[in-house]
């Protein structure tokens, strides 16, 4: 099967990193479902853009933490395009907290989206992938899970570390069916999540400071991450599984990990 036969689901595909991933997979030729939670406007504008460029796309709302909503979405994709063959678990939220500011409810919500969300989508698509004896699953984790130590990110990092180990374990479970499971661990990327709540001056200072920590001297763009995802998702990448690829410009603050 080539790119034209692929059906991709990108969770949180309307904005930020997910938007670049959805656009990239559509450009390769896959039919793409742009999932969103609340920002229908962003998802619909991307769908219109992909279609205007000759691609195939639909937008589907579903909170990934809601198992039944995810199953409903996967059924609707199947009736529109066929079974999902590429799943990108990109939807994520970050709640900053320390031991001092720990908040049970906010942290539970973060885990439900960042970890349970990926479990729900994988469970919803794996039956179809098994029947096809082929599938690509790419989880978006973070370099927070593998070494960087920005203040306030401890609990977020823990959710991403959980998703990282699940990536390796699910690769083992699904490998016999021809399904690959890999992760892309982004460094600091210019998106709403990264910028949240910062003034122009603060943002300039942060991007300069974090850019200087990378060997390549800049922070990332969503397209930098989409390029790595496209590699794992490609029909030709069928013998690459259980890998975590850091895409971070070569962060020097944890070079010794
Ligand atoms: P973003 O700009 O805040 O976008 C997050 C996306 O996730 C939005 O499209 C949002 O949907 C969706 N989303 C959130 N909760 C959801 C839910 N419950 N169900 C379905 N969709 C949901 O974030 P981003 O920076 O692009 O981050 C994308 C991924 O990369 C996340 O997993 C994040 O942890 C990871 N990451 C980001 C960075 C970075 O520096 N930006 C670094 C490392 C890892 P709506 O549009 O409907 O709100």
Image (tube, rainbow, N blue to C red):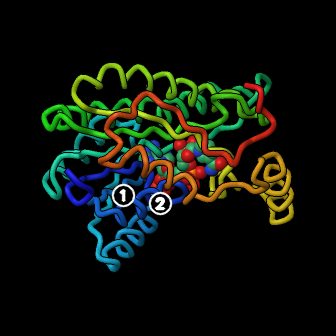
Q: Quadrant of the C terminus?
A: top right
Say left or right for 74 vs 253.
Answer: left
Instruction: In this rendered view, identify the residue nearer to me: 164 or 35.
Output: 164
Give the labeled residue for mark 1. Answer: 34
Query: Farthest residue toward the bottom?
Result: 52
Q: Above or below — where is 45 with respect to 153? A: below
Residue 147 placement (x, y as % from top left): 71, 29
Instruction: In this rendered view, identify the residue nearer to me: 118 or 247.
Output: 247
In percent of the image, x 17 and y 34: which residue is there? 133
User: Which of the 4 quarters of the picture holds residue 201?
Assistant: bottom right
In percent of the image, x 47 and y 45: which residue is there? 91
Instruction: In this rendered view, identify the residue nearer to me: 41 or 20.
Output: 20
Count residues near mark 1 (Cα–Cα under 10 Å), then give few for <14, some for 14-19, many for 20+: many
Say left or right for 48 vs 83.
Answer: right
Count residues near mark 2 (Cα–Cα under 10 Å), then give few for <14, some for 14-19, many for 20+: many
Q: Above or below — where is 24 with respect to 157? A: below
Residue 100 tag number: none
Residue 57 placement (x, y as % from top left): 29, 65
N-terminal-most mark, 1 or 2: 2
Whether disc 2's CB lies below 8 Å from ligand 1 is answered yes
Q: How many marks?
A: 2
Q: Are marks 1 and 2 in contact (CB under 8 Å)?
A: yes
Whether disc 1's CB lies below 8 Å from ligand 1 is answered no
Per the image, label 2 sits on a secondary structure element best described as: helix
Per the image, label 1 sits on a secondary structure element best described as: strand
Give the labeled residue for mark 2. Answer: 19
Give me the C-alpha separation between circle 1 and circle 2: 8 Å
Residue 83 placement (x, y as % from top left): 18, 46
In percent of the image, x 65 and y 38: which residue is there? 95
Q: Above or below — where is 83 with respect to 48? A: above
Is residue 158 visible to us here? yes
Is residue 93 visible to us here? no
């Amino acid at each position: 099967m080539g790119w034209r036969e692929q059906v991709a689901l990108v969770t949180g595909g309307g904005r930020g990193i997910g938007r670049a991933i959805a656009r990239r997979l559509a450009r390769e030729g896959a039919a793409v479902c742009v999932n969103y939670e609340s920002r229908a406007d962003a998802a619909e504008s991307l769908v219109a853009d992909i279609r205007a460029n000759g691609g195939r796309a639909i937008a589907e709302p579903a909170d990934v933490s809601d198992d039944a909503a995810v199953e409903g979405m996967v059924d609707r994709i199947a009736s529109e395009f066929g079974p999902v063959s590429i799943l990108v678990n990109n939807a994520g939220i970050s709640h900053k907290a320390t031991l001092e500011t720990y908040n049970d409810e906010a942290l539970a919500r973060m885990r439900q989206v960042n970890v349970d969300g990926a479990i729900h989508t994988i469970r919803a698509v794996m039956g179809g992938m098994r029947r096809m004896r082929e599938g690509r699953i790419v989880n978006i984790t973070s370099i927070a899970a593998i070494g960087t130590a920005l203040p306030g990110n401890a609990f977020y990092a823990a959710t991403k570390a959980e998703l990282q180990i699940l990536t390796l374990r699910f690769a083992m479970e699904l490998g016999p069916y021809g399904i690959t499971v890999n992760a892309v661990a982004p460094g600091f990327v210019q998106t709403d999540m990264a910028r949240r709540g910062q003034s122009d001056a603060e943002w300039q200072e942060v991007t300069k400071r974090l850019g200087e920590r990378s060997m390549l001297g800049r922070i990332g763009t969503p397209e930098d991450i989409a390029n790595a995802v496209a590699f794992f998702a490609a029909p030709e990448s069928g013998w690459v599984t259980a890998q975590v690829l850091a895409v971070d410009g070569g962060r020097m603050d944890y070079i010794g990990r």
